[in-house]
Amino acid sequence: MPSIYSLPLELKRHILGYCNIQDIAALAQASAPLNVIARDYIDHRLHVMTAAFFGSTKTLKSILRACDVVISGLCALHILLPANETSWSPSDLDIYVSCRYLACISVLLEHEGYEVVQQQSIDGGPYDSSSIRSVVSFSNTCQCINVIVSTMAAAVSPIFEFHSTAVMNFIMADSVFCAYPALTLRLMSMVNPGPIYFGPWGVKTMQALIKYGARGFRLVPCNDVHGLSAVCRSMPHSIADRDCLWVNTNMMSCVTMSPSDVFYSLGFINLIWLLGGYICGATYPFIRAQCFLIEDDS
């Protein structure tokens, strides 16, 4: 029986298509040849998802680095899950940027043939988040890129205020992040109650939850998943927590991010969030979802 090393490239990629990104990162640490195969596979998946928007992943990564931006939404979720067991594909690209880098990414997207076709404030669309200043849509007549502009220094702040844990993921130039891998990689999700109870777009939030349900995600009560690692809506979480998943795609390994690592990668020291909702197993009291950014004050 031939080893995986001697198989055709297409077959190697097909085999890895049954693994989630955490399993692929673990496999990549078994040997140097497997690491090469794993890195090729993740780069290939990123190319397949974004080829319609950019000529190469090299172009995309250069934009991500230049503007300190991240990709979130369905693209980030798709790359976390096994490709062969994920029947849907993302049709658009959501890029998150801090307000101070909007001009930078606008210039770079225009250089790639895109132009602004719509700009809406937070009150003009379904993105109910206090951390969003505006949503700017770019198009090249064939594809649309949504640029979500954060009011804060952190481009990622709005991601932790959306409807559920299933979308609290993002892709950087050299890393992939998942806030709740114990849930997301098992196709489970908990609701973030803020957009439902306190936002003007409750109906659209419910529609989003239904959409993710159609994609295989099961909403679970907090009590049912307390046995999983650090999963509780009533407890604060940090982007530097060990229970978050960080995969360095250059080394194809799961890494632990310290606050200093976060600072050099994302430009802030830490981000702490709380899902909120009713205290586990009770109907009172109710905690409002919260998100705090810790910045450099030097």
Image (cartoon, grey):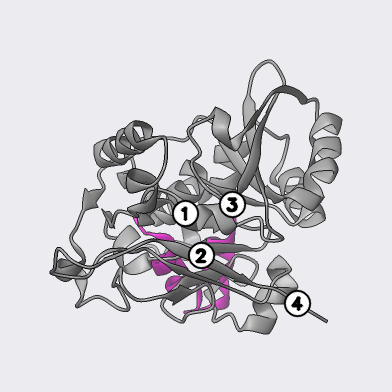
Label 3 crowd bin: few (<14), some (14–19), many (20+), radius 10 Å: many
Residue drawn where x is 63% and y is 23% of the image? 143
Secondary structure beneath dot 3 equals: loop
Residues in magenta, as a range: 18-42
Q: Position of residue 172 (x, y in %)?
A: 64, 58
Residue drawn where x is 38% and y is 62% of the image? 2
The answer to whether the residues at label 3 and label 1 have Cβ atoms under 8 Å apart is: yes
The answer, for residue 42, to whether it is visible in the render is no
The answer to whether the residues at label 1 and label 2 have Cβ atoms under 8 Å apart is: yes
Q: Position of residue 267 (x, y in %)?
A: 74, 68
**Which label is found at residue 161?**
1
Q: Is residue 24 above or below residue 52?
A: below
Residue 103 included in the magenta stretch of the image? no
The answer to whether the residues at label 3 and label 4 have Cβ atoms under 8 Å apart is: no
The answer to whether the residues at label 3 and label 2 have Cβ atoms under 8 Å apart is: yes
Mark 3 to mark 1 CA distance (whole Å): 8 Å
